[in-house]
Image: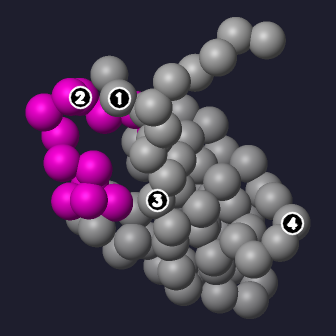
């Protein structure tokens, strides 16, 4: 499985609605509310054959209340 993160900017007042829809869809591993330019940070895992761009475009961006997304692909997880 390949992990990646998506930062999500929500329309005003829609952050909890978007987070709940992501949770209900059971596509996210972890969902965090954040401060700053984006409202949510969401961790996903997809199969190695899955196109991450298509996944985000087809499964994440259509959720009502999302204004913008930024996808972050990671390389290595370090143990602390």
Q: Residue drawn at (65%, 68%), measured in percent from left and top?
A: 17
User: Which residue sits furthest bottom?
Assistant: 12
Residue 47 among magenta residues: yes
User: Which residue sits furthest top?
Assistant: 79
| Residue 5 visible from this viewpoint | yes
Please identify the quadrant where the C terminus is shown. top right
Quadrant of the image occupied by residue 56:
bottom left
Would you call the spot at circle 3 few (<14 residues within 10 Å), some (14-19), or many (20 or more)?
Answer: some
Q: Residue drawn at (36%, 74%), measured in percent from left and top?
A: 62
Q: Name the side, left or right, on which 38 lies relative to 46.
A: right
Q: Secondary structure at mark 1?
A: strand
Q: Residue drawn at (83%, 72%), measured in percent from left and top?
A: 36
Q: Is residue 46 above or below residue 78?
A: below
Q: Earlier in the sequence, mark 2 or mark 3?
A: 2
Residue 2: mark in rendering: 1
Would you call the spot at circle 1 few (<14 residues within 10 Å), some (14-19), or many (20 or more)?
Answer: some
**Disc 1 to disc 4, C-alpha distance:** 26 Å
Q: Is residue 63 above or below residue 23?
A: below
Foreground pick, 55 / 78 = 78
Disc 2 to disc 1: CB gap under 8 Å: yes
Q: Position of residue 37 (x, y in %)?
A: 75, 77
Q: Position of residue 38 (x, y in %)?
A: 71, 71
Q: Earlier in the sequence, mark 3 or mark 4?
A: 4
Residue receiving disc 2 = 47
Q: Residue drawn at (66%, 54%), measured in percent from left and top?
A: 41
Q: Position of residue 73 (x, y in %)?
A: 44, 46
């Amino acid at each position: 499985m390949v992990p990646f993160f998506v930062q999500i900017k929500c329309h005003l007042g829609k952050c909890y609605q978007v987070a709940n829809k992501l949770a209900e869809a059971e596509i996210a591993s972890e969902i965090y509310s954040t401060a700053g330019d984006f409202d949510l940070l969401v961790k996903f895992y997809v199969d190695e054959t899955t196109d991450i761009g298509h996944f985000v475009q087809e499964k994440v961006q259509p959720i009502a209340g999302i204004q913008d997304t930024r996808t972050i692909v990671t390389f290595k997880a370090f143990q602390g």
